Image: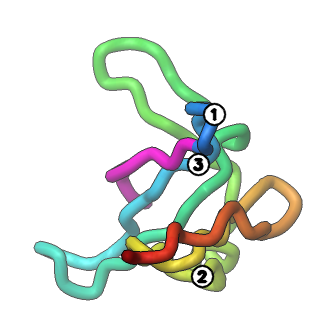
Amino acid sequence: MGRIVDIIVDHSGQVRAAVIDFGGFLGVGNRKIAVDWSILRFGSGEKSRVVVDLKRAQVKAAPEYKDGKPVVVLGASAAMPLAEPAPSQ
């Protein structure tokens, strides 16, 4: 359905979420969402895939990830706020 394009870590360096780019073609019509790291399942082998057990409707309803904006992470049970962005100076 998509591809991992970024990783979100907390202040302690713990990986919290993956940013996944869904849909679109050549960058048009795509959107990014943040998915809780704990619900990702990693395959093995040369052409391993990452699998997440979410329904298409959940992905479509998830808030879009935008750099510099508050992050909402789609988790196993519900979407939850991860953090507020740092204030710009």
Q: How many marks?
A: 3
Residue most toward the front? 89
| Mark pair 1, 2: CA separation | 25 Å
Tell me the element at label 3. strand
Residue 74 coordinates in the image, percent (x, y): 69, 64
Q: Foreground residue, 80 or 48? A: 80
- Which amino acid is tagged 2? Pro
Magenta stretch contains residue 38? no
In the rendered structure, find residue 17 and report the number of the disc placed on it. 3
Q: Residue under circle 1?
A: 12
Span shown in magenta: 1-9
Residue 10 figure quarter: top right
Q: Residue under circle 2?
A: 63
Ranked by sequence position, the earlier of labels 2 and 3 is: 3
Q: Foreground residue, 7 or 22? A: 7
Q: Closer to us: mark 1 or mark 2?
A: 1
| Mark pair 2, 3: CA separation | 14 Å
